[in-house]
Each structure stands twice: as structure tokens, then as C-alpha cells.
Image (spheres, rainbow, N blue to C red):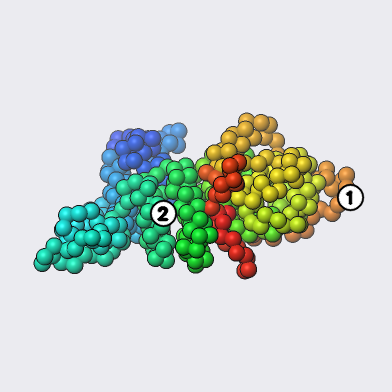
Amino acid sequence: MGSSKQPPTSQPPPLTPDKRHPISVVARRTGLQADLIRAWERRYGAVVPSRAENQRRLYSDADIERLKLLKQAIQEGRAIGQVANLSDEDLRSLIAEDQAALAALRASTTGKPINPFGTATPGTSPAPGAPAPVNDPMLVPPASIPQYLRDAMIAIENLDSRRLSHLLQQASVSLSQVNLIDQFIVPMMRQVGDRWRQGQLRPAHEHLATSVVRNLLMNLPGAFKVSRQAPHILITTPAGQYHELGALLAAATANAEGWQVTYLGVGLPAEEIVAAAHQLKVRAIGLGITYPPDDPDLPAELERLRHLMPQMDFIFGGRCMSAYEDVIESISGHPVHSLNDLRGMLIKLRNQATTPKAATSFTAANKRTGAPAYGMPRPRAAQESSTGISSREFLGSRSRNGNESANNGSRPAGSSDPGVD
């Protein structure tokens, strides 16, 4: 293929008459989310817009055409990192090649629908004399969320991480982030958990699904530019809680709501959470509680958090959150039962006074109790544990009718519950 383009320089190209479309227009014409366009520009140099006097991005007709080509290539099964630096001519050739392969695949059947893995639908057979089907699962992009879900479950059953990763990439292009998480990822992981409990899937299937989803979620927040003046939330799980997928969903959701997000991983002691919150001057702390539902040490850990930070807003979610609802109520925590609940809570907190509470409450608690400044001699530890990624599964709490969400995340050796994080 042709030579690669160079990533954008720090200086945008000069403004010319052909650079006249704001990003809102580009998003409408291409069907791509504005945040995704920015991410492709920033990470891959896919397009290089100019800047107006007010520093707004302006795109040309050629930029729009290129974005349409990139979107089409991804819908044909390509990864953005594979195609972002190709020339427009090479993109057209690649798309034509993929479409020709798909046409050959369709011609090899009797005219009945084909399944998403490049083989004839059960009950059909290749036409006499036709070439064998092309067994490439990347050729047929799903057309709807139910199809995404069906294809994803087949990929998980087959332990096909490549196919599952491509499906998630395709979905991240064609769906808004809310729909991607609420209508695709959460229901998929719920199905994985349900089928594990029924003995239809093994732990290896759950681990594969969790790993692929985690990789996607770790990159989602970076697609959103957030003001440095935006409120800051720290998201983690308390000591003894080692499922992280739900916390990552919460981090992506908070970032999409315009919050600065620091995700600190899983299983942090109260002292480390407090030290990080003090250093970052966060507005709120989100804590995922997924498994186990009967940890005898967790209530005391949550009470210690409140003791050290009497004014902090703590947000709690997770499949096992209801098992600890008495202590959550006693420390005036905010329980959320879905990602929509989380969005509402973030809006509520943002509309309240945004003076950082972490530093003042941390210091005040120590003065009153004589407690040591937990974690203060070790601020670097909190920084090193952060990845910097600054529907119901954080969140994944039991609904009031007793149904479980399915949060599937990593867990320590010996844990037997694959429930979603």
C-alpha cells in the first residue's frame, strides 16, 4: 500500500477557504461521533483540520470524504490503527477488495442469508461448482445491536478474541457511547455471567470476554476532552473487592459526562484512597462492590473512609452493593443501581457547590482524631497504581426485584463468582 501519513504536528495547517466545516457538521455528514473524530485525529493523524480564530476545528470536503472511507473500512472489519495512515486511494482499494471478497462469499451460497462467520447458514450448501466459502469472520459487519450481541456470544463461545475485539471496535464506531455500554457491553456481560452460572460457559470464556472489554474501556475515556476546571472523581474498589469491569464502565461514563476521572484499579485500602483523594482534590469518590457479598471486613473499611473524610461524597454501586446497604446508609453514601442512576448523581453533584472537599475533610479528620496522615508519605504509590484514564454494572447492582446484573471482571485466585464487576 502507499506511504503512511505523518501524525499531526503541534501547529495546524493554515486556514484556507476549503476548510469550512465545523466538527458538528462533519459528525452529521459522516455518522461518526465528534469525540471519536477528535480521537482519530489526536491518536492517529487520520485527518488534520485547520483552526478558526476562535480555535474551533474546521474541516474540508476532502476531510469528510476521508472520514467516510475510514468508517467504511472499519465496518468491513478493519481496525482504525491498521488503516488510519493509508492514503485515500489505498483506502478505496482496500474497501473494494473486502467488498469483492464478501460478494464472492455471498455468491458461494444458495442465496440464503449467511452467518457472520463466513460460512453458509446451517441447512444450506454451496451452489454446485461454486468456490468454497471464504472463512473470514472479519468480512461481515453486524447490522444491529441484537446482531452484535449474537455475534459476540458466538465469538466468546469459540474463544475468538480477535473476532470479539473487531466487533467491539465496529460497535464503538457505529454506536454512541451510551448505547455501546448500556445496550451492548452490559447485556453481553450479563449473558456471559448467566451462562457461566448455568454451566454453559467455562471461566476461560468469561476471562476472555472481560479481557477484551477491558481493553476497549481503558481507551474510551481518552476520546473525551475534559476541561481542567471540570469536577474530579476518583474511581476504584475497596480492599477485598477485586472485580474491575464495572468500575471501568463507571469511569467511562463519568468521563463522557464531562468529569475528570482518575481510575486507581481495584482493592485499595481506605488509607490509600484517602491519600489519593487528598492529593487530587476530588469532588467525589466512586466505589464498586461486586463480590463477595459477605466480606466481614468491608463495613469497617467503609466506616473508616467516612471517618477520615466526613464531608466527601461517596458513590456506591455493584452487584453486591445491596448486601452492604445498612453500612452505606449509615455513612450517608450515595447508592446507584444503574449507569443512568450514576449519570443523574453526577449531574446532581456537579450542580452543587464544587469546592474540593478532599483536602479540607482529610485534614480536619486527622486533627480531630489524632490519626496519622495515612498515605501522605507515599503519594507516589497512589500515582503508580493509576492507569491515568483520567446501565447497571458499576454498578451492576441487584435490582429491586432480585434480578442480578452480570458483571464479569478479573478476580483473585480461588474466587468462584464470575459476576460482572
**Amino acid carrying mark 1 in the image:** Gly
Q: Quadrant of the N terminus?
A: bottom left
The residue that appears at 42% across and 46% down in the rendered structure is 36
Q: Residue at x 19, y 57 (%)?
A: 106
Q: Is residue 61 visible?
A: yes
Camera-side mark, 2 or 1: 2
Query: For the residue labelled by badge 1, is the local secondary structure a helix, a strand or a loop?
Result: loop
Classify residue 378 as left or right of residue 68. right
Q: SS class of the residue under badge 2?
A: helix
- Which residue is depicted at the point 54% across and 57% down? 408
Vertical order, 157 against 53 (above or below): below
Rendered location of residue 93, percent (x, y): 21, 57
Quadrant hosting residue 177: top left
Give the image quarter of residue 376.
Answer: bottom right
User: Outermost residue, left direction?
Assistant: 129
Q: Which mark is residue 168?
A: 2
Corner quadrant of residue 83:
bottom left
* Cα gap from disc 2 to disc 1, whole angstroms: 50 Å
Percent across and percent down for residue 10 are 45, 49
Query: Hey, what amino acid is under mark 2?
Result: Leu
- Residue 59's spot in the image, x, y percent? 34, 40
Residue that carries the numbered disc 1 in the rendered image:
370
Task: Report the side of 92 relative to 217 (left or right).
Answer: left
